[in-house]
Image (spheres, grey):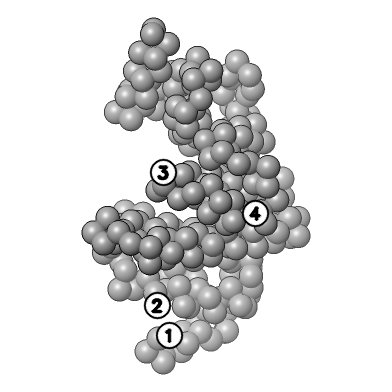
Amino acid sequence: MKNIKLSDFEVKVLDGSEKEESLKSIRELVFGRAEKLKGKSLIAPNGQHVDAFDFFNMAQYFEMQIHHFGIERQMPMANDYAQMMGQIIQEDPFFEYFFLIGKNYIHGLRDTEDSLRYTSPNKGIRKIILDTHVRARDNFSNARKLFIETKLPENMRFYETTMEIEKAVSYKREFFFRGLSESDINSVFKNNDLLDDLVIPSQAAIKIYHRLLEKGIFLHKEQAARAIYNLANVMKFIPDKYKKALEYCNCAKEILGGLPEIEETTRYYEDALKE
């Protein structure tokens, strides 16, 4: 382990052979299950039959495109993609855990709905956003349950923490920043065992990020540093945590360098603590 030491806890980061072993077990698990899809037929929107394993390999590329170019340039394909992913998930629900339908696709829908909301703000658009997040909550809960049931190797906790818990943070905070009421927020998250007792969004984010950093195992130091910065950033609403937040900012800056957002957040806490 190549841990990052903070005053109140250590963040675990895999090093060298540990990292390679972890990646290897993840690859074997995912591609081992994917190979079982060979010979199973998916029906594309144009009526053509596509081998499920071939689609799985194409899907990896599609996700990369989303990351690099954004959902807007891919939206004509995104609905077709989600429909076919739904067919793969019916074959093996495990894949809901790894694919766009449970994470990036919904994130992309959220971005698209955001622009709609700003150009035509009305209750209908707000409902679309809320409905999208209800689907996200269901995906989150189902994937987390499946994760526990499949008893994955210990180093697979990386996926549970970085993908799913962090996703829950972002959805909880997104409601808050969009001005939806607390009752709207809690109605969406009321059935989620992880978030039952988390009422105030900023406190929810802090608690979950703490859990992410204390319990998670990261593959890269930079990824851990980004999560440390995110924790610092959500402390802006709680003045008695500013000193701790500044420590987290400085730690992230040491690893990631002087990124503009980190510099800005660091100055925010420095100025606030001088007052």
Query: Along the polypeptide, which appears first: circle 1 or circle 2?
Result: 1
What residue type is disc 4 on? Lys
- Foreground residue among 189 and 206: 189
Q: Residues within 10 Å of mark 1 (few under 14, many from 20)?
A: some
| Mark-to-mark CA distance, 2 and 3 | 31 Å
- Decide: marks 1, 2 in contact (CB < 8 A)? yes
> How far separated are the C-alphas under marks 3 and 4?
19 Å
Circle 2 residue: 80
Marks 1 and 3 in Cβ contact (< 8 Å): no
Q: Identify which residue is drawn at 37% across, 70% down.
A: 78
User: For numbered disc 1, what is the local secondary structure?
Assistant: loop
* Observer-nearest of 28 and 165: 165
Q: Which mark is residue 44?
A: 1
Residue 14 visible here: no
SS category of the residue bearing label 4: loop
Q: Residue 241, position in %: x, y? A: 53, 20
Q: What residue type is labelled 2?
A: Asp
Residue drawn at x 53%, y 54% is 184
Tell me the tag on residue 177.
Answer: 3
Residue 190 - label: 4
Of the 4 image quadrants, the one containing the N terminus is top right
Which amino acid, by three-letter code, is at mark 1?
Answer: Ala
